[in-house]
């Protein structure tokens, strides 16, 4: 089962130097492939590892080809495929009773959203949180904030159906972004939130995430803001110790995080069932990608069996 670069499956074969997994193991893949010995890895920031040894060089003999032509692997993993050839540092073992179509969601979106809450921002119990954007990543942020014990979780989006879905993931309040989301969030939170998360990737929403903070609050930008776009912030706000930061893949330690997320799902605390909008075949992928643009669905899962 594969969902873009999010995937889960069963190990078919391993190389002679592989020791972490063996054929038959159930795994989730992750694009945060790590080397294990650089400064980032050794200081617990594995998601930032950029060592080239875990990926194929431009001049190296290709590992995968078709008809004599080199086949590139997206994010060093590949996607939309029945089989994947990956580095052993790109997989995490999980328990065998975890449904594969739910496990696939953990590979990227869930790890990114929940991780941004618990690792990057370190949301404290009893705090107030606002999440801008209620797609798969944003819903995972909301779910993560609920697991972290946030007292008030405000979901912000333009699509009413997604705002309603956000309540299932733990949102205590919803705000339609068509109005004035900053003013509404400030009113609901008594002057601003402790933590805000931007899960869309736009200049305007990144600026709004900073504007809706209370003094001392932290805004975490998860969305991929287009190259060249510059975010403008009100300088004097920094005197009130307001902070803005980025997050990549939820600052994950995925071999530890993913098995824990599986446990949270099986305990009923991580709401993956509500995130699956439907199951599709690979031949339906183009229509599924177009559906994402409407903002009406959270995730479709491609099934190969």
Image (tube, rainbow, N blue to C red):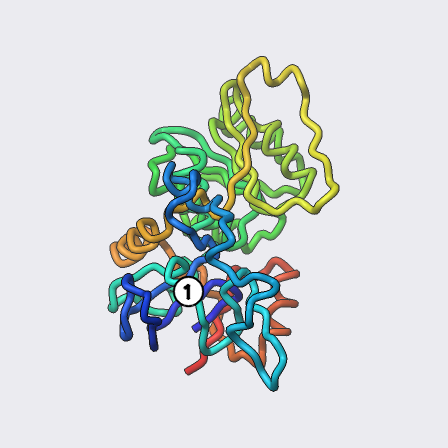
Residue 58 in view in this figure = yes
Against 287, residue 137 (above or below) is: above
Image-quadrant location for residue 59: bottom right
Against 4, residue 228 (above or below) is: above
Against 44, residue 295 (above or below) is: below
- Figure quadrant of the C terminus: bottom left
The residue at the point 34 percent across, 31 percent down is: 125
| Residue carrying label 1 | 104
Q: Nearer the viewer, residue 166 or 40?
A: 40
Q: Nearer the viewer, residue 69 or 162?
A: 69
**Relative image position of residue 298 (x, y in whole percent):** 52, 59
Image-quadrant location for residue 271: bottom left
Tag 1, which secondary structure? helix
Against 239, residue 37 (above or below) is: below
**Relative image position of residue 129 (x, y in whole percent):** 46, 34
The residue at the point 38 percent across, 36 percent down is: 43
The residue at the point 41 percent across, 46 percent down is: 252
Q: Nearer the viewer, residue 297 or 174?
A: 297
- Figure quadrant of the N terminus: bottom left
């Amino acid at each position: 089962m594969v969902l873009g670069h999010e995937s889960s499956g069963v190990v078919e074969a391993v190389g002679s130097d592989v020791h972490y997994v063996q054929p038959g193991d159930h795994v989730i893949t992750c694009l945060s492939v790590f080397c294990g010995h650089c400064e980032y890895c050794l200081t617990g920031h594995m998601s930032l590892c950029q060592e080239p040894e875990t990926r194929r060089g431009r001049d190296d003999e290709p590992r995968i080809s078709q008809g004599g032509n080199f086949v590139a692997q997206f994010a060093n993993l590949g996607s939309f495929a029945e089989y994947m050839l990956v580095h052993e540092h790109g997989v995490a073992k999980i328990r065998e009773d975890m449904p594969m179509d739910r496990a696939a969601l953990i590979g990227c979106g869930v790890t990114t959203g929940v991780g941004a809450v618990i690792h990057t921002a370190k949301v404290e119990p009893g705090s107030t949180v606002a999440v801008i954007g209620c797609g798969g990543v944003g819903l995972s942020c909301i779910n993560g904030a609920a697991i972290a014990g946030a007292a008030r979780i405000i979901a912000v989006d333009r699509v009413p159906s997604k705002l309603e879905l956000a309540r299932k993931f733990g949102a205590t309040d919803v705000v339609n972004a068509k109005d004035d989301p900053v003013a509404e969030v400030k009113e609901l939170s008594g002057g601003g939130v402790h933590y805000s998360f931007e899960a869309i990737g736009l200049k305007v929403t990144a600026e709004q995430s900073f504007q809706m903070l209370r003094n001392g609050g932290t805004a975490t930008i998860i969305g991929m803001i287009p190259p060249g776009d510059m975010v403008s912030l009100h300088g004097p706000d920094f005197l009130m110790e307001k902070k803005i930061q980025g997050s990549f893949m939820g600052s994950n330690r995925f071999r530890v995080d993913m098995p824990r997320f599986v446990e949270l799902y099986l305990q009923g605390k991580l709401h993956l069932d509500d995130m699956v909008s439907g199951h599709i075949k690979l031949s339906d992928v183009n229509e599924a990608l177009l559906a994402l643009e409407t903002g009406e669905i959270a995730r479709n899962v491609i099934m190969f069996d």
